[in-house]
Amino acid sequence: MRMPTWIRRHLAAVRALLVLTAVLGVAYPLVVFAVAQLPGLEGRAGGSIVRTAAGRAAGSALIGQSFTGEDGTPLRWYFQSRPSEAGDGYDPTSTGASNLGPEDVLDTLADPATGGGAEQSLLTRVCSRSKAVGDLEGVDGGRPYCTPDGVGAVLKVFGTRAPGGTVPKPSRVVSANQACPAVPFVAAYRGVRVECARPGEDLASGLTVPVRGDAPAEPRVPADAVTASGSGLDPHITPAYARLQAPRVAKARGVSEARVLAAVRHNQTGRALGFMGEPVVNVVRLNLELDRDHPLGAGRS
């Protein structure tokens, strides 16, 4: 007796389900797991866990960490990672970027009544980070389009606009990112006294004029020291940023700068496949190596 068509179709679907479940749900995962246990691969398959000299798990070589104190102050005896926008910093459950672009140059100043509502622009984030790194490393943290106090050097210029959008004869000029009672980074613009910004005031109608200033075109503080990665989890910094930090770390640990730089080179990797990307230094591995080979002693400062 021949079964009805609809029954045959259901039986075929059940057979396909069982076969695909066996192949893709059982056999394939077992093969992948077995390959992952091969020598040289088991560590990566297990999360690339890195350990202290005592054998305690200290994190993953694939995920960066913040080497700061409880108050957020950088620990001088550790190399510092690049900034992170993932949660409170290097949070794998909140991976992501700030999504701010190069035209984001105007801050939202704090509400004078509540003190809240403040939001830094991308420019001010870069400027403030560069100043902080410069202060920490004892170098000039100045950058183009940044004020000496570490905010974006941006003016809002008011007046009649000429063809092309310029304001040849301003009637009022405001340093948009410097809240009163701050002293503006320039005293005057085209003969008009520059004012500090009054929080809550609407400056949208003014012409936005970023001011480059006299900072060098090549700042002492590298770009990766002031910008976060797309994921917010990158454990690497550039060799230039590592070399900038080496004197501070060497002094804090009471060892020679040459030994610290040797550790930097040991944890540096080149371009992927010889041509993709740039050389980088793994900060997590580097700090663990320093703790193992040059533990903190009397030279700590």
Image: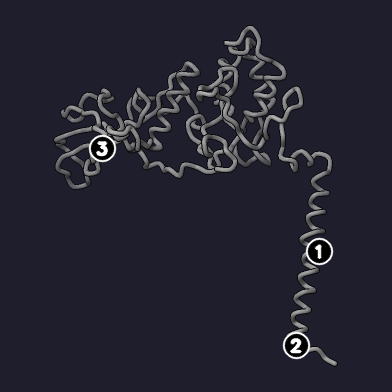
Q: Position of residue 297 (x, y in %)?
A: 66, 10
Mark 3 burial class by Cα count in 10 Å: few <14, some 14-19, many 20+: some
Q: Position of residue 62 (x, y in %)?
A: 65, 37
In this rendering, is residue 21 above or below 62?
Answer: below
Q: Residue at x 48, y 23 (%)?
A: 133
Q: Amino acid at mark 3?
A: Gly
Sooner in the amino-acid sequence: mark 2 or mark 1 = 2
- Name which quarter of the figure residue 276 lies in: top right
Cα separation between marks 3 and 2: 74 Å
- Name which quarter of the figure residue 265 lies in: top right
Please name whichever residue, 20 or 167, is drawn nearer the observer in this view of the structure: 20
Q: Position of residue 134 (x, y in %)?
A: 46, 21
In this rendering, is residue 252 above or below 29?
Answer: above
Q: Position of residue 235 (x, y in %)?
A: 61, 34
Secondary structure category for the residue under label 1? helix
Q: Residue at x 79, y 57 (%)?
A: 28
Please name whichever residue, 235 or 246, is drawn nearer the observer in this view of the structure: 235
Q: Looking at the rendered structure, which numbered label has been put on residue 35?
A: none
Secondary structure category for the residue under label 3? loop
Mark 1 burial class by Cα count in 10 Å: few <14, some 14-19, many 20+: few
Q: Amino acid at mark 2?
A: Thr
In this rendering, is residue 37 above or below 242?
Answer: below
The residue carrying mark 2 is 5
Residue 22 in view (yes/no): yes
The residue carrying mark 3 is 200
The residue carrying mark 1 is 22
Q: Amino acid at mark 1?
A: Ala
Q: Residue at x 66, y 25 (%)?
A: 286
